[in-house]
Amino acid sequence: MTISFKHCIVLSLVASVLSLTLIAYDRFFGIVFALRAHMTEKRARTSLILIWLSALAVALPVLLYRKLNVRHWSDHVEQWCDDEFPTWTTTVDNVTVTEQTSRTAYYVVVSVVLYFVPIIVMTFAYSIIIMKLWISTIPGEIVDKRVEVQARTKRKVIMMLVVILVVFGVCWLPCQVILLYSELRPDKEQRLGDWFRDVQFSGYCMAYSNSALNPLIYAGFNANFKRGKFKCMPEIFVSKSSFISTV
């Protein structure tokens, strides 16, 4: 159970950040370089397939090296999951030290390259987009209402994407900080106290709350999505009540 749980965390992070990066890329070239080719349905489908294949490949080491450990005590059996990456043993001053350098390198690369760097790139891209939309003016004294409506719609969509990006960054940031701290702390040989387990659990809760917040963001910026969501909710409750009454 915990093996697949850790694998799903990495898989969800990589797929989410790559999807947001793809959206930022499409919006950036669609608005800043409007005359260039836009994202077609075929390109979008191919990009989504590549995103999930990349996410599966990046998360594969967690699935391979995550192991269930069992320790038998006199009155109970202790079980826990941990990463068992390939180890290197070194001896310094007659002291043997066993290190999982590959594990540290893996998690640091995943955190920096697939979280912090994309967040910075997307922040830069959306900043340029916002400057382009808000600073640009339409020439002429008479403004076409259709063009004005299209510009207003674009701004609303961009603001929604910016909010999604900010919420994603805030929700996943504690989890990344906890991960980097656990991998880069100088006293890795010492076991962390119970406080770390509570902080880690809170970080995971914040990370997964991102999936629950996204529909609320969509509903706040999109009236059609809001109407569709409330239209589906009565059907869900009716189906549940019908199921309960038949049991």
Image (cartoon, rainbow, N blue to C red):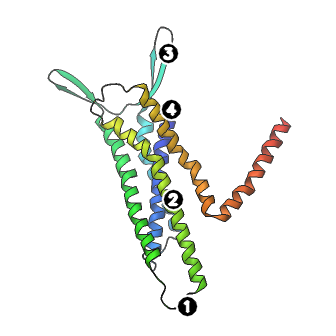
Q: Earlier in the sequence, mark 2 or mark 4?
A: 4
Q: Secondary structure at mark 1?
A: loop
Q: Residues within 10 Å of mark 4 (few under 14, many from 20)?
A: few
Quarter of the image where the N terminus is located: top right
Q: Earlier in the sequence, mark 1 or mark 3?
A: 3
Residue marked by disc 4: 2
The answer to whether 131 appears left or right of 183 in the picture is right
Q: Amino acid at mark 1?
A: Ile
Q: Position of residue 226 (x, y in %)?
A: 67, 60
Q: Amino acid at mark 2?
A: Val
Q: Secondary structure at mark 4?
A: helix
Query: Mark 2, mark 4: which one is toward the viewer?
Result: 2
Q: Earlier in the sequence, mark 2 or mark 1?
A: 1
Q: Which residue sits at x=37%, y=27%?
A: 192
Q: Earlier in the sequence, mark 4 or mark 3?
A: 4
Residue situated in front as seen by the camera: 226 or 38: 226
Residue with the most extreme left position: 93
- Examine the rendering and report whether any part of residue 7 can be seen: yes
Q: Earlier in the sequence, mark 4 or mark 1?
A: 4
Residue marked by disc 3: 77
- Which image quadrant for residue 175? top left
Residue marked by disc 1: 142
Residue marked by disc 2: 163
Spatial CA distance of label 2 from label 3 is 46 Å
Spatial CA distance of label 2 from label 1 is 33 Å
